[in-house]
Image (cartoon, grey):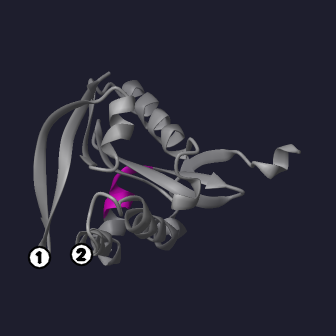
Amino acid sequence: MNATAFPEAALRPMLPDDGPLLAAIFQESIDVLAEEDYDEGQRNAWASAADEPSFLERLEASLTLVATIGGSPVGFIALEGPGAIAMLYVHPAVARQGVGSMLYDAVERLATGRGAKQLTVEASDNAKPFFDAKGFMSLHRQTVEIGDYWLGNTRMEKAL
């Protein structure tokens, strides 16, 4: 076995041309990784956000980091303001291989360096265990309306 059999992930800032790839990662992640927690209608409604111009605008207005393997995007995280994690998505092909942790850890360091006292996230049911493991505390359950569908998530925070 050689080192190229398992290429390492790298981080970089979002580039202007990343929009379509990040939208595809967002949609594929929801479709595959959230399948056990949300029904097809809920997943389709949630994933439809990638088709809106506001999706790219939100990423561009945030501090968005992209994880790459072999130069190709495989995940991303968006930090809004000093400490709100707006999005954290990885392609299903690299799920549970440390890409999400790498993205999260980088944003936590950046937020701390910028003086944030806490991080917040509205974690989907499938993402909640990830944030639990990162030391987040659940504040409350909530529902979000997307089109004709309601999706549950958990508002969480972590003191820095």
Q: Where is residue 145 in the image (x, y as percent from the top left)?
A: 11, 65
Q: Distance between the residues labelled 1 and 2?
A: 9 Å
Q: State the SS at label 1.
A: loop
* Residue pictured at 72% horizontal, 57% vertical: 70
Please tell me whether mark 1 or mark 2 is closer to you in this view: 2
Q: Is residue 20 left or right of residue 134?
A: right
* Amino acid carrying mark 2 in the image: Gly
Q: State the SS at label 2.
A: helix
Q: Is residue 158 magenta?
A: no
The quadrant of the picture occupied by the N terminus is: top right
Name the residue nearer the viewer: 18 or 48: 48
Rendered position, 114 above or below 124 = above
Look at mark 1 in the image and give the residue it sits on: 148
Q: Position of residue 105 (x, y in %)?
A: 48, 33
Look at mark 2 in the image and give the residue it sits on: 41
Residue span colored magenta:
58-64
Name the residue nearer the viewer: 116 or 94: 94
* Residue pictured at 53% horizontal, 70% vertical: 17
